[in-house]
């Protein structure tokens, strides 16, 4: 035997051992590559699904729903999430599921993509069913009630389906996966809340229209502002029964002022304490000194009765922006010898109707066209076939900006207005800026308002600074009734004189206004605190006010409330710049 034989035998043995080991290594490598590809494909599908969901959210207005614009992206999202879920459940990944940490991530990822597919599928079904409902006839009162109740039932069934969606394991997840799970959970929670609110609002509206109901309707003009709403310049009465409604002629509130003996008491203690000196229980144009619409509306309902009107079940307030939404759905209306359209109604009511009118003309209130156009617009809604999606979109936009407000003395209907976000309430986290016109003019159209909010942490408290900048851009040549001066007020042409009122969160303390020691109003205002100071801004000039207050260091996010100002208030806050419209959450 050769001396090299043992060495050759040993090498042969090693080769025999290495061959299967190499095959195993190759197999493991191939498996890992396949695993990586499967996970990559699953991730890409999930990312595509999320992109489609965002596209669907961009087409979520009632008009978009009616035209089915959200259906295609939601269908694509469902397909992508289903593909991702199948990939995450692939047998190729089975060995990884046996691992204690990695397996939990895989199971969670598979459950999340499956849940996302289910949620997208529910969205497809809801959009399709809503489209079918909205295409049903709605020309008669009973048909409108059926339509609203069908939509309410659809909202309830969709909410129930979302409630049953399982998101899978949520403990001990890696950061990105835990973040995505939280995001999906929040979106499902928000969707369920939105569906519940929609169902409640639709059922409440159906109940109100079924009637019989009697509502006081206040027409507000944004060229002469109050807190969170325009000044109530006209009042009429809306009656509903069996889905139909009728509206009385509007009367100028100028003609409805109450004498001291007839005026009802101000039962809201904060309204009485803060603003009672301005007699809002006698002077309709001084309703709205607080942005809390329930307090204003409840008082208005009793003032209406004191003035000889029938007792009412509730109060609605609308302004030219709401009328613009109505006209987009119904088409133009004829008022006298003029045709009023959605494109020109705001300019007409906020400015053009006052051209050539003297500031001291006592008949101007009787020539207010706001109530007349409101009556014609609502009559068109009753008498014509209108675009359901356009109406819903217009009213939703008006509601987000406090251009449409509602209050009811009936608790179930009040819950409906709250669900529809048209109740005009404030909460303990609310922050609202209002500028109240006291110049007997229509200059709010020319008053730019900007609010800047900033915070400084100091120990166990948070110092907040709110700068409110007012700029008077009144041009030359305006009608006296628009730009004044009104006799006896001691102001000149184009001067804006009024009150800047700020509602602060309930827990705000150490409230000051830089350079001011006396206030028009200061103290509790419902669940908030209010501080208000007088201002006069000369034509072509600006004035800045600085409000300072403290909050607890652990205070939750502030809620910046909308204002019905036209033009809208511009806001700057940490991490956000926006115009007043929908309520905005500001993290501290």
Image (cartoon, rainbow, N blue to C red):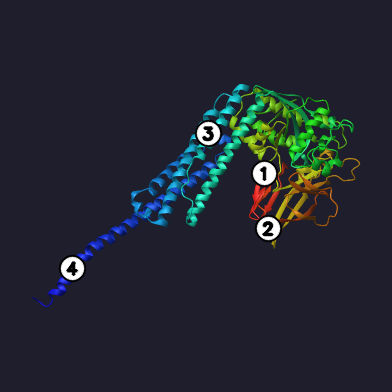
Label 1 and label 2: CA atoms lie apart by 28 Å
Q: Which numbered disc flags the more N-terminal residue, 2 or 4?
A: 4
Residue underneath mark 1: 581
**SS at badge 1:** loop
The residues tagged by marks 2 and 4 sit, at their Cα atoms, a distance apart of 73 Å
Horizontally, residue 382 falls left or right of residue 226, namely left
Q: What's the mark number on residue 157? A: 3
N-terminal-most mark, 3 or 1: 3
Q: Give the residue displayed 80% in from the left and 25% down from the top.
A: 309
Ranked by sequence position, the earlier of labels 3 and 2 is 3
Point out the image quarter for the C terminus: bottom right
Q: CA distance from mark 4 to mark 3?
A: 70 Å
Residue 164 spot, x, y in % from top left: 49, 40
Q: Residues within 10 Å of mark 2 (few under 14, many from 20)?
A: some
Question: Residue 45: which disc?
Answer: none
What percent of the width, then of the height, locates residue 302? 80, 31
The residue that mark 4 highlights is 13
């Amino acid at each position: 035997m050769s001396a090299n034989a043992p060495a050759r035998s040993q090498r042969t043995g090693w080769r025999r051992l290495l061959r299967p080991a190499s095959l195993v290594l190759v197999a493991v490598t191939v498996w890992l590559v396949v695993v990586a590809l499967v996970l990559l494909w699953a991730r890409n599908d999930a990312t595509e699904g999320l992109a489609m969901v965002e596209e669907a959210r961009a087409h979520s207005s009632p008009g978009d729903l009616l035209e089915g614009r959200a259906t295609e992206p939601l269908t694509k999202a469902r397909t992508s999430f289903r593909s991702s879920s199948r990939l995450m459940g692939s047998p190729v990944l089975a060995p990884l599921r046996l691992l204690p940490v990695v397996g939990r991530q895989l199971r969670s990822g598979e459950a999340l993509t499956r849940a996302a597919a289910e949620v997208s599928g529910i969205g497809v079904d809801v959009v399709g069913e809503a489209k079918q409902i909205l295409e049903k006839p709605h020309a008669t009162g009973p048909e409108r009630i059926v339509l609203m109740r069908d939509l309410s039932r659809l909202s309830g069934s969709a909410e129930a389906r979302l409630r049953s969606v399982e998101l899978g394991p949520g403990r001990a997840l890696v950061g990105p996966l835990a973040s995505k799970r939280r995001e999906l959970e929040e979106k499902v929670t928000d969707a369920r809340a939105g569906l519940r609110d929609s169902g409640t609002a639709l059922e409440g509206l159906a109940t109100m229209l079924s009637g019989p109901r009697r509502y006081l309707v206040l027409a507000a003009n944004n060229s002469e502002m109050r807190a969170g709403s325009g000044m109530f310049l006209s009042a009429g009465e809306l009656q509903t029964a069996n889905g139909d409604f009728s509206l009385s002629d509007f009367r100028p509130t100028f003609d409805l002022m109450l004498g001291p003996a007839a005026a009802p008491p101000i039962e809201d203690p904060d309204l009485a304490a803060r603003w009672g000196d301005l007699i809002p229980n006698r002077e309709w144009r001084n309703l709205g000194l607080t942005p809390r619409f329930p307090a204003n509306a409840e008082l208005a309902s009793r003032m209406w009765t004191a003035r000889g009107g029938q007792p009412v079940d509730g109060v609605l307030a609308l302004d030219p922006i709401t009328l613009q939404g109505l006209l987009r759905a119904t088409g133009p209306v004829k008022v006298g010898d003029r045709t009023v359209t959605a494109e020109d109604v705001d300019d007409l009511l906020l400015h053009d109707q006052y051209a050539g009118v003297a500031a001291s003309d006592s008949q101007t209130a009787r020539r207010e066209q706001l109530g007349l156009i409101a009556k014609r617009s609502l009559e068109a809604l009753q008498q014509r076939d209108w675009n359901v999606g356009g109406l819903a979109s217009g009213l939703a936009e008006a509601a987000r900006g406090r251009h449409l407000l509602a209050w009811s003395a009936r608790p179930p209907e009040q819950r409906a207005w709250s669900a529809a976000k048209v109740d005009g309430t404030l909460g303990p986290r609310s922050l609202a800026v209002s500028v109240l016109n006291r110049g007997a003019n229509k200059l709010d159209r020319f008053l730019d308002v900007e609010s800047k909010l900033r915070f400084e942490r100091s120990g166990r408290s948070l110092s907040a600074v709110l700068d409110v900048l007012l700029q008077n851009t009144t041009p030359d040549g305006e009608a006296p009734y628009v730009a004044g001066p009104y006799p006896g007020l001691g102001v000149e042409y184009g001067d804006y004189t009024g009150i800047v009122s700020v509602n602060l969160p309930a827990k705000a303390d150490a409230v000051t206004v830089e350079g001011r020691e006396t206030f028009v109003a200061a103290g509790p205002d419902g669940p908030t605190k209010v501080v208000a100071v007088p201002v006069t801004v000369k034509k072509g000039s600006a004035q800045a006010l600085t409000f300072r207050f403290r909050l607890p260091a652990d205070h939750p996010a502030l809620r910046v409330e909308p204002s019905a100002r036209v033009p809208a208030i511009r806001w700057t806050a940490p991490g956000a710049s926006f115009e007043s419209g929908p309520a905005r959450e500001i993290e501290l």
